[in-house]
Amino acid sequence: MWVQWAGFVIPSIILSHLMLCTLLQLLVGLASKLRSVHRVVSYIKSAGATVNLIQFLEAPQHDLRVIAIKLLHLLSGYMGQELADGLRVTTRQLGTLVRLLGESSVTEEQAYAAGLLANLPMQDHFLTRALLSEGALPILVGRIEEVKRGVARVGVGRNIGPFQKGLVCILSRFTFVLDDADIVDEARKLDLTSLFTSLLRMSNLEEVQQSSAQALENLSTKSKQLSRLPEVTKQKHGLFSCFPCGKKPPPPIGLCPVHGGLCSARETFCLIEAQAIGPLVACLDHRNTSVVEAAMGALSTLLMDTTDVERGVQVCVNSILIHQKLSSRETSKSWSKACILLHIATIFLQEPSFRPHYLISPKDVWLFCPVSTPVSMFVLLKIW
């Protein structure tokens, strides 16, 4: 292994273990400060030392490996694409991180590793595919289930929060590449829709709620495509079967009211069958606008042109009314506003000619919810 320091390439065998720890710890200190982190990032990029730092993930010394993961975690917010490229180029480091996440404990090292992978660009589909090849999906789902059940050793409480945030964010990246048939099959096998719904319902962490809502939005966009009508069996009528009896076959029962076919949380990622509407509606009153927008994005998939818009709105309205009865008086006004906007969405989404050309999608309608007032809604109606 080679180490580049101060412009010189030095065999790491020359540097003692203590010196390597000191140098990396110095970089950690600089990367932890906003004033100096940009200089560290600029130096690493110009020196081409990204791969050299990633190679420390294979260090045999535990303390050296922890410092290296912490440094990469701090840098991932500023050079995520470079680190993603480096992890794909190297041979074992990505698998090392995945296996580290799968270990039974919840350590500081695992929390940094989860945060590092969570900060890498979601749009890098090649990295997502590489994570799939390393068997990351079942490992992530298994660890998330363990954290939900509280299966953790005593004394690791401070690491559970960051660890869970990172795991859910990494898992959600697989929902951005649902055009890949292998990932769709894995999502069905692991029932990701039900998992994200339970996280949305049970977790109080804002990052977990936001990532779960975004993942549900991505999954729900595939529901109409995956939903199928039941096969109609032709019945025989004996000798006179060639003559029509004048009766139409009865309409199939048990169809999804929004997608119009046979739906399930596991097979078609249907939000209705996963009972995700209630938890998503509950997020509409969240103080964090990012959580609110993520929940709106997921709910807006029920108002797409490929779905039954009227029934989709009605499902959302019913959930809002139910939640309004369970909410306090202080939040009842916000639910009423959201309910009114849903009815507005019904009017404008049913008749495309009413909508202006710059209204890109039904998701735009939801963006008025967090700041909507009776006056702004009246102006909105006048503009439309």
Image: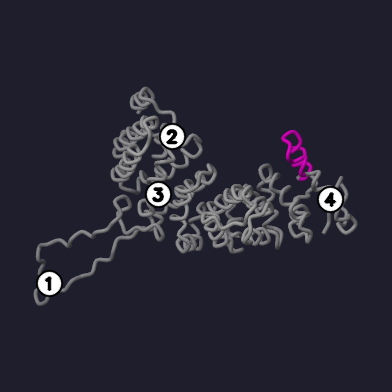
| Residue hosting label 1 | 242
Query: Disc 3 marks which residue?
Result: 276
Labels 4 and 3: the sequence-earlier one: 4
How many C-alpha atoms fall within 10 Å of the one at disc 1: few (<14), some, or many (≥20)?
A: few
Q: Is residue 153 magenta?
A: no
- Give coordinates of residue 350: x percent, y percent: 29, 40
- Mark found first going from the N terminus, 2 or 4: 4
Q: Decide if residue 122 is on the left or right side of residue 326.
A: right
Closest to the observer: 327 or 284? 327
Residue 45 in picture, x, y percent from top left: 76, 45
Front label number (1 vs 4): 4
Amino acid type at circle 3 is: Ala
* Kind of residue at badge 2: Leu
- Residue 230 sits in which quadrant? bottom left
N-terminal-most mark, 3 or 2: 3
Q: Earlier in the sequence, mark 1 or mark 2?
A: 1
Rendered residue at 48%/60% (across/down): 187
Distance CA(mark 3)–CA(mark 1)? 48 Å
Q: Tell me if 199 is positioned left or right of 69 in this view.
A: left
Q: Which residue is mark 4?
A: 4
Q: Residue tagged by mark 2?
A: 367
Closer-to-camera residue (107/248): 107
Q: Quadrant of the C terminus?
A: top left
Query: How many angstroms separate mark 1 from mark 4 (CA)?
Result: 85 Å
The magenta-colored residue range is 28-44
